[in-house]
Image (tube, helix red, strand yellow):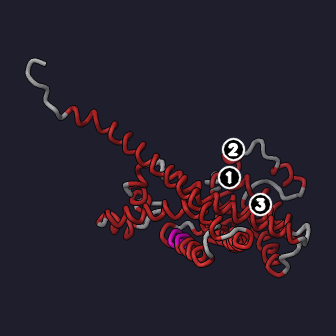
Amino acid sequence: MIQNAVHNLLVARETGPGRLLDWRITALATQKNRAEDIAHRLGLGSPGPRRMCVLAVSQIVLATAGLVSPRNMWIFAGLFVIEVLTLPLIRTGLDGADEILRLVIIVSVLRNLSDSAIVQLAAAAFLGGQAALAYLTAGLSKTQSIMWWDSSGLRGIAATEYFGARPMARLLDRHTNTARLLSWTIVAWESLFALALLAPREITLAALAIGLVFHLSCAFGMGLDAFLLPFAATYPCVLVIQDWLSDHLSAVERTGIAGAAACAIIGFAAFNLGQERQIAWSAAMPETRSTITAPAGE
């Protein structure tokens, strides 16, 4: 949350008139959002750099208090209110990291409603399951693009001005086989991450370690530092689920469920690969036909 607030402070100036996040522009996407009415009721003034700075500083103060007193429900409730009030000002910059961060805040509020073990387990299970679902969705969506199968997607991202790193882009262009292996590794890890919930603890820890390396690489290589801490916050919850499943399911049962899930995931990926190759082949056919000279008289 502190990192998120620092980001907001850095972009606060862009919320002013004529800037990138001018309220008159972002409001077009938030006309049905009541955050603006709430802000006026709280006396936060008109949208702009001053309000963003007030919200960001308040966020830092509350987040610091949350580190000292993590069992205080009202601290996290306040953080959620600040997130709601900040949303209209940065609407155009939201991504998956913001969604995960918001879920962590909400669950932090709900799990403090009771000290019951079942409530704590449910909260952890929800966040751990959400992380697994997020990775699964990201991985399977990549299998539906030939650009991730032939690595052109990864090489293209590395070459962009916004997310790219030129040394990495040149390296991947020179070593296309390495780029393809790296692309397939990312797709496979994301798609199969959910199986770590059913795996032995050593394998689960290895999957989480790979996740940290992946997000660190994205943070330093692509500037996607906003994903690192929100997703890392869900990793202890993944371990909670793994421990619970290990206690309540035998090794044979967990292996059977994991095997069935792996077959479904791999089958889905293989189907998408075949479909993408067929589409790519069909798209290339007209060009191929144009190079063939028709026999005389036809």
Please tell me which residue is depicted at 71% across the width and 70% down the height of the picture: 237
The three-letter code of the residue at mark 2 reads: Ala
User: Closer to the N terminus: mark 2 or mark 3?
Assistant: 2
From the image, tell me which residue sits under label 1. 91
Q: Compute the Cα span from label 2 to label 1.
A: 7 Å
Residue 194 percent across, percent down from the top left: 61, 62
**Range covered by the magenta-colored residues:** 214-219
Residue 74 percent across, percent down from the top left: 89, 68
Compared with residue 280, is residue 93 higher up or lower down, i.e. above or below? below
Q: Is residue 211 left or right of residue 9?
A: left
Q: Is residue 170 left or right of residue 82?
A: left
Compared with residue 20, is residue 56 higher up or lower down, i.e. above or below? below
Determine whether the residue tagged by mark 2 lies in a helix, strand or loop. helix
Residue 88 percent across, percent down from the top left: 73, 52
Please name the predominant secondary structure of the magenta segment in the image: helix
Task: Tell me whether circle 2 and circle 3 mark residues in contact (CB < 8 Å).
Answer: no
Q: Is residue 46 left or right of residue 209?
A: right
Determine whether the residue tagged by mark 3 lies in a helix, strand or loop. helix
From the image, tell me which residue sits under label 2. 29
Q: For residue 283, which quarter of the picture? A: top left
Please tell me which residue is depicted at 62% across the width and 67% down the height of the picture: 252
Please tell me which residue is depicted at 43% across the width and 61% down the height of the picture: 184
The three-letter code of the residue at mark 3 reads: Glu
From the image, tell me which residue sits under label 3. 83
The three-letter code of the residue at mark 1 reads: Arg
Task: Tell me whether circle 2 and circle 1 mark residues in contact (CB < 8 Å).
Answer: yes
Other residues around mark 2 within 10 Å, as few (<14) / some (14–19) / many (≥20): few
Please tell me which residue is depicted at 29% across the width and 66% down the height of the picture: 174
